[in-house]
Amino acid sequence: MRWMRGCRIGGKVGRIGWSPRHPMTMTTNAMKTRSHSRSFAWERMGLVAIRAILISLSPRSSLMMYCSVFFVYAVLIVVLSMVFKSDLASVALLVLPLHAVLLVLLLHAAWFSAWSALGHPPRPSANDPKGFGPPVRWFLAATTISMRTYIHIIAASVATDFARFLTVMINGKSLKAVKFFPLIARFALWVAAPVYVMLEPFHIAMWIMD
């Protein structure tokens, strides 16, 4: 084998097992590099998640933006309630969780439109999201708004669920009247979207917020 050549010096056998070209040494180094890159990616994604939460709770965020988003949702809920002749709470509990799906769709729309404009996948710290024109800029703006209002839409959905639960209790109805499966499904959807954003292979959130 190549890594064993030149190891016999003056009739004595040297330490062959730790040659830099030894297959075991090369495999160990590759595993260490891969492990380090994985831990670095997890640290970066953790920082991105913390930053996203802090931005969504930041007082510097525009009040007009929040009012506009809630106004759009309110109009949509009222219109759908009139069309399907259903109560506002039921429609709200169907519409508000779709914000999680909207976030994922907008994230990928921004990513693929930037990819189309560049001719290659956008890279964090190399391709500044602010340097793109329409339609990438529009998708990025919508994604940022969706991220910033995510916690607030969750709060509105939880408040609606709580109000419905209180209504059931005040009216003296049984807990069987509370539909727990849709409640669990909504909770799973709210949790799944940010988990997916943190674990998806393209690291789109890292590129947008880096």
Image: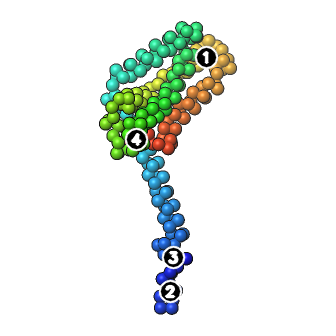
Q: Secondary structure at mark 3?
A: helix
Q: Which mark is residue 3?
A: 3
Tell me the amino acid under the disc marked 3: Trp
Q: Which residue is mark 2?
A: 8
Please state which of the two labelled residues, at mark 1 or mark 3, is closer to the viewer.
3
Please state which of the two labelled residues, at mark 4 or mark 1, is closer to the viewer.
4
Q: Which mark is residue 119?
A: 4
Q: Nearer the viewer, residue 19 or 190?
A: 19
Residue 112 is situated, as x and y percent measured from the top left of the image, at: 44, 36
Q: Identify the residue at image location x=40%, y=29%.
A: 139
Q: Secondary structure at mark 2?
A: strand
Q: Earlier in the sequence, mark 1 or mark 2?
A: 2
Q: Nearer the viewer, residue 12 or 185?
A: 12
Q: Which residue extends farthest front? A: 119
Q: Nearer the viewer, residue 4 or 156?
A: 4
Residue 82 is situated, as x and y percent measured from the top left of the image, at: 54, 8
User: In whole angstroms, how far apart are the C-alphas of marks 3 and 4?
Assistant: 43 Å
User: In whole angstroms, how far apart are the C-alphas of marks 1 and 3?
Assistant: 77 Å
Q: Which mark is residue 132?
A: none
Q: Which mark is residue 169?
A: 1
Residue 207 is situated, as x and y percent measured from the top left of the image, at: 39, 41
Q: Earlier in the sequence, mark 2 or mark 4?
A: 2
Picture quadrant where residue 53 is located? top left
Q: Which residue extends farthest bottom? A: 11
